[in-house]
Amino acid sequence: MAAASSSDSDACGAESNEANSKWLDAHYDPMANIHTFSACLALADLHGDGEYKLVVGDLGPGGQQPCLKVLKGPLVMNESPLPALPAAAATFLMEQHEPRTPALALASGPCVYVYKNLRPYFKFSLPQLPPNPLEQDLWNQAKEGPILPLGCHAGPFPCRETAEEPLSIQSLRFLQLELSEMEAFVNQHKSNSIKRQTVITTMTTLKKNLADEDAVSCLVLGTENKELLVLDPEAFTILAKMSLPSVPVFLEVSGQFDVEFRLAAACRNGNIYILRRDSKHPKYCIELSAQPVGLIRVHKVLVVGSTQDSLHGFTHKGKKLWTVQMPAAILTMNLLEQHSRGLQAVMAGLANGEVRIYRDKALLNVIHTPDAVTSLCFGRYGREDNTLIMTTRGGGLIIKILKRTAVFVEGGSEVGPPPAQAMKLNVPRKTRLYVDQTLREREAGTAMHRAFQTDLYLLRLRAARAYLQALESSLSPLSATAREPLKLHAVVQGLGPTFKLTLHLQNTSTTRPVLGLLVCFLYNEALYSLPRPFFKVPLLVPGLNYPLETFVESLSNKGISDIIKVLVLREGQSAPLLSAHVNMPGSEGLAAA
């Protein structure tokens, strides 16, 4: 009876935990044999049928060959071998033509493999690097005769650590051989040309010219030779190349390539570099106290995970905003974006089997997993909008679905004031200048306020006088009298020497039409010629815009331009009702001639 009661209580506790959880357990397979990290996971509608698949760049541990896996639900529907370990996977739109199915890009070694409809479409290879000059000379000498002294193991080859430029793969293999094997290796490979090839370390996507979700995107690659490359989505040519002081390992981008963009790169030297459009070198640098393990952009904040078991928030200019300490080491990070509620948060997988979700430094939710999570991906999977996909250290696959009624509340686990509230502020000491200024303001406060008010009233008076003068001289394009409610603006079209001048005259009255108006042009007759410098205006119906067109002929062949004054007059009155000054452009036709 006691055993039965204990089992019943355990079942009730599990049911209550499931009811209080914000997640539904959709699938768990501890033997899925998926070994990857977050950069090699991607969700996309690869066939345009509304069914989103999971793309996995599998590392293939234990001597297995790396491969590309495509999962539909919990099952693997496609598997393709890869020649090298995958570095990143991304989906992007290459063109605007229908059907709008995204392409899949997989970075592996020195190449980016592009798939469309899960079929190989294009292979982009990084450009080769120039070889080490001393290495090239030594291999050229090897073609003519032996160059290895018998008592030297490495021969006259430059040292790998002290060489100004890294050695090629052929020379590195040569340096690993025993002395008895070197001569045969040289005879076999001395006729081969020296090739030095870099590899891709990270990859992401950048919108080309629109910020829409289904807009065309460019690929951004980080390479082992400390460079960032932006590729054209159609021709796969290099659009931009940027240099970094170290090798990039994580990338975050925002903006559009053709307009303006920011690019944040976390590098192996423990720094984060910020680059902008048209900058070949970093504009800002964020120095971390430990190596980065993840980089996520949440709105305008860069969230960085470090090996000191902490999350840090920075602005794009490098200002530190906050720090949150984790209970265990951070293994992986990714972005959680819930479009229906406008939520963006950071997911961090920890070594103790927890997945923590943070918005800024506020803890929103904690997910407990049976094994440590090594990769995270959140988005639309199948036909569910909010699906969380996790892979574990032992190769397991966990799929959870966010409940439609789930609402994340900040501060669910942290009670009380933040720790920063108890810290004393470092208030600077009061200087003698500060004390003197305070005494002066205390003694002469009334006089200072009166002087400020006097200057403010003088400014308002001068502005009112200038406005009155503009009204009296009719320099405004809007009529100031209630009897003549008119509005005027002018448009100049053409390259020259003949311009088209269009006056848009409008009666802003609601009921009364306007009749008996004249238009007069005042201009320098040595520079311009008008066929009708003076004409009558027809009846102006209230609310309608009347375009009045005339042509202006430029007479100067030196490209000189001047102002043409447009006056709107009433018959029998000398003072104009409205006036406009038209800045004429230079005549490009005469300048070219």
Image (cartoon, rainbow, N blue to C red):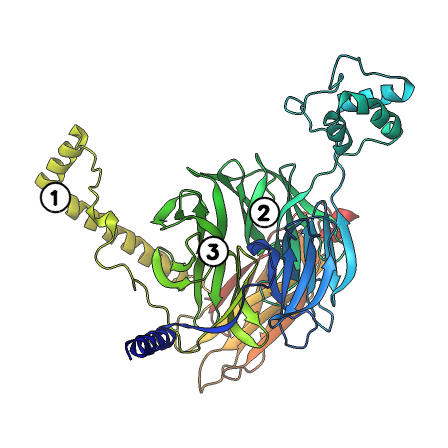
Name which residue lies at 69% across and 59% down.
Answer: 68
Height in image: 182 above or below 373?
Answer: above
Q: Determine which of the numbered discs, if any, sits on residue 62 in the image.
A: none
Q: Choose mark 3 or mark 2, whichever is in front.
A: 3
Height in image: 400 above or below 524?
Answer: below
Q: Determine which of the numbered discs, if any, sits on residue 277 in the image.
A: 2
Q: Is residue 143 left or right of residue 371?
A: right
Do the numbered discs 2 and 1 sit on residues whose CB atoms are within 8 Å? no
Give the residue type at disc 2: Arg
Q: What residue does disc 1 label? A: 445
Q: Is residue 357 left or right of residue 527?
A: left
Q: CA distance from mark 3 to mark 2?
A: 39 Å
Q: What residue does disc 3 label? A: 372
Height in image: 365 above or below 329?
Answer: below
Mark 2 residue crowding within 10 angstroms, few (<14) / some (14–19) / many (20+): some
Of 160 and 239, nearer the camera is 160
Residue 103 percent across, percent down from the top left: 70, 63
Give the residue type at disc 1: Gly
Label 3 vs 2, first from the N-terminus: 2
Badge 3 marks a residue whose secondary structure is: loop
Residue 409 percent across, percent down from the top left: 33, 67
Residue 508 percent across, percent down from the top left: 46, 78
Label 3 vs 1, first from the N-terminus: 3
Badge 1 marks a residue whose secondary structure is: helix
